[in-house]
Image: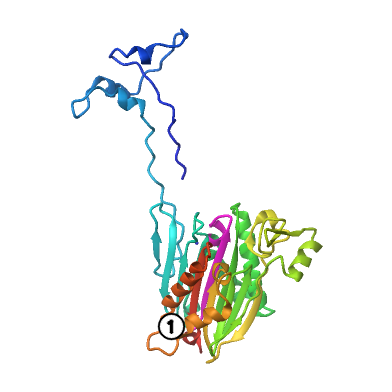
Amino acid sequence: MPCSVAAASSSPMFYPSSKKLSPILCKPASSPPPLSLSPLPLAIKKSFNNKDEDGGEDGLSKVMVLKRKRPARIDIPVLNMGFDDIKMNEDKDDKLSEMEVEGEGYSMYCKRGKRGGVMEDRYSSILDLRGDSKQAFFGVYDGHGGAGAAEFVSKNLYRNVMNKVASRTQGGIEEAVKDGYLTTDVEFLKENIRGGTCCVTALVHEGNLVVSNAGDCRAVMSRQGVAKALTIDHRPSQKDERNRIENLGGYVDCCHGVWRVHGSLAVSRAIGDSHLKEWVIAEPTTEVFRITQECEFLILASDGLWDKVSNQEAVDVVHPLCLGIDKPEPFSACKKLVDLSQSRGSSDDVSVMVILLSHFIQ
């Protein structure tokens, strides 16, 4: 889902005044060469030649602490989905701290981590694909090295995936989704923006649920109250991922208990990360499921949740808030999961999306 201000000199500046300065200020340690003084700015001259508004002495004391005026803040948009009404809460530093969405058949809540910095998570939710209320695209994106990659992917991945799905002449939908991910990766690398992003997406297409991920964002479905992970976390600690990286001439090592690619990145697949692109690939893992009455809801979340909350725990929190009641409360479920993760010590950004699958049964 992102202006620099020049600081004034911290050293005081002394200018000649129409009044006689005290010996302490004007007597030098040794006789310096004559100074060539540039004309003073009009605003400074005025401060010497006029009294203060309150009738006090001239502006010498003000000149001694004069600082350069701070330029006006530039508003840089950090999130512009254009598909849903979104409520964004900002803290006193004008940094995005929360994202809240309540849509038709789904809700999403994201909260910035306690470790500070900018929020690097983003999301996408596109309903009524091709004018069909039973088709939609959802995604959660966990950026690293800045929010640029997650912001870019949130705006472009769905378009590339849907273009590939519409234009495919052979092969299954899994291949079309993979091509959409890879196309988005190529487009992002051309932008020369640092960082990358993990992704998890869910495409509801012709009665099927097409779930894909690259990295450690995860999708978990509830089927009659039982949690089922639909994705695999792509981490360099996995034997197959480690072998793939090493066979390409790269290496993985363990730093403070965390396995990393080249001692840097803790995931082995992501969109972006140009400096590791040879080993950190954008190819997703995809699974296709038929949506039936047993499929209750789907949770898409960043690793900020899954590092502190198990799959079944997450389902147990959401289940009573979304099933068996007159008005399901998926947003309350999202917020409760985020709060649970942070109460257990998560300092990462936490993003949770809950999708009510009954809304999309054909």
Q: Is residue 328 left or right of residue 355?
A: left
Dot 1 falls on a residue whose secondary structure is helix
| Residue situated in front as seen by the camera: 317 or 102 | 317
Taking 71 as reference, is 257 above or below it?
below
| Residue in the picture at 76% in, 66% down | 242
From which residue to which does the magenta span run? 134-151
Type of amino acid under label 1? Leu
Taking 320 as reference, is 83 above or below it?
above
The answer to which image quadrant residue 207 occupies is bottom right
Farthest residue to the bottom: give it: 293
> Which residue lies under the disc numbered 1?
321
Q: How is the image coloured?
A: rainbow
Q: Is residue 142 magenta?
A: yes
Taking 241 as reference, is 288 above or below it?
below
Residue 298 in view of the camera: no
The answer to which image quadrant residue 22 occupies is top left
Q: Position of residue 263 (x, y in %)?
A: 70, 56
- Count of number-bearing discs: 1
The answer to which image quadrant residue 181 occupies is bottom right
| Residue situated in front as seen by the camera: 18 or 157 | 18
Farthest residue to the left: give it: 55
| Residue in the picture at 49% in, 85% down | 360
Residue 229 in view of the camera: yes
| Residue in the picture at 42% in, 76% down | 331
Q: Is residue 105 magenta?
A: no
| Residue in the picture at 42% in, 69% down | 100
Q: Position of residue 356 (x, y in %)?
A: 48, 83
Q: Is residue 209 left or right of residue 119?
A: right
